């Protein structure tokens, strides 16, 4: 049987109250996620940085500015998509997420994804790609190639922060966002089709290594 979707406000309230790992001690506030709750494309980054922790929104710093530019190559605007991170609280000094933090925090991302029910999940960088696809294969091999996780189309792309430090990645990232735009153009948005004409909804399948 399909599990009911939990309203985003309810998931947010659970994250606000979360004290499952030590990251809660250092947070100014949680960074839950933002954007169109009906989005066809959900972008999943790694973890909040300093600016995100202060403003409570994902991708508002330098990487976010660049992400906004990249979205245009796919014909997307920030308001079209939903953005969230693997971790909802900032790791100190922007260190890498630890396996235990990922394990404790990702049930929130899973529920968010079920509720938003995007057609595409765009994973930015190694942490979200490895989590969503449950793979050890790195982003260098997977970027720009369409994958699947259960019912979701997954499109891994380098993390925009990587291109801030290494400008040679910019061409690759622009190409990958253009490819995403072409994939979106190949089929109409299923949510824009009248319900009676839609294919019966596919069974909610697992991603991130757990049964749906
Ligand atoms: N990098 C991320 O992965 N997420 C953010 O929200 C900001 C920077």
Image (cartoon, rainbow, N blue to C red):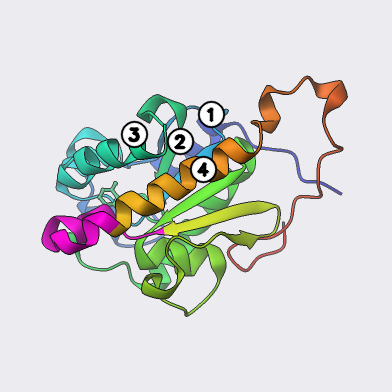
* Magenta range: 157-171
Callout 3 touching callout 2 (CB < 8 Å): no
> Is 30 situated left or right of 76 in this image?
left
Identify the secondary structure beneath mark 4. Answer: helix
* Residue indicated by mark 2: 82
- Image depth: mark 4 or mark 1 in front: 4
* Residue indicated by mark 4: 182
* Residue indicated by mark 3: 72
Quick one: label 2, few (<14), some, or many (20+) residues within 10 Å? Answer: many
Q: Disc 2 versus disc 4: distance between alpha carbons?
A: 19 Å
Residue 153, placed above or below residue 191? below
The numbered mark at residue 37 is 1
Q: What residue is at 34 percent from the left and 34 percent from the top? A: 72
Q: Disc 3 versus disc 2: distance between alpha carbons?
A: 15 Å
As drawn, which residue projects farthest toward the top? 194
Return the disc, 3 or 2, that comes first in the chain's sequence.
3
- Image depth: mark 4 or mark 3 in front: 4
Callout 2 touching callout 1 (CB < 8 Å): yes
Return the disc, 2 or 4, that comes first in the chain's sequence.
2
| Residue 23 image position (x, y, % from top left) | 28, 58
Return the disc, 4 or 3, that comes first in the chain's sequence.
3
- Image depth: mark 1 or mark 3 in front: 3
| Residue 204 image position (x, y, % from top left) | 75, 50
The numbered mark at residue 3 is none
As drawn, which residue projects farthest toward the bottom? 136
Quadrant location, the C terminus? bottom right
């Amino acid at each position: 049987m399909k599990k009911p979707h939990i309203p985003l406000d309810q998931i947010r309230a659970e994250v606000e109250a979360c004290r499952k790992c030590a990251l809660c001690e250092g947070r100014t506030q949680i960074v839950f996620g933002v954007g169109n709750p009906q989005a066809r494309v959900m972008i999943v980054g790694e973890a909040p940085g300093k600016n995100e922790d202060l403003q409570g929104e994902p991708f508002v710093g330098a990487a976010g500015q660049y992400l906004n530019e990249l979205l245009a190559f796919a014909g997307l605007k920030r308001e079209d998509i939903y953005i969230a991170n693997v971790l909802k609280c900032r790791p100190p000094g922007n260190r890498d997420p630890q396996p235990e933090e990922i394990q404790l925090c990702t049930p929130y991302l899973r529920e968010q994804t079920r509720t938003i029910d995007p057609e595409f999940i765009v994973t930015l960088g190694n942490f979200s790609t490895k989590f969503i696809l449950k793979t050890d294969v790195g982003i260098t091999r997977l970027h720009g190639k369409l994958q699947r996780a259960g019912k979701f189309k997954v499109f891994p792309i380098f993390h925009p922060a990587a291109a801030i430090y290494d400008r040679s990645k910019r061409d690759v990232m622009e190409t990958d966002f253009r490819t995403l735009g072409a994939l979106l153009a190949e089929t109409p948005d299923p949510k824009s089709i009248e319900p009676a004409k839609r294919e019966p909804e596919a069974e909610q399948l697992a991603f991130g290594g757990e049964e749906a």
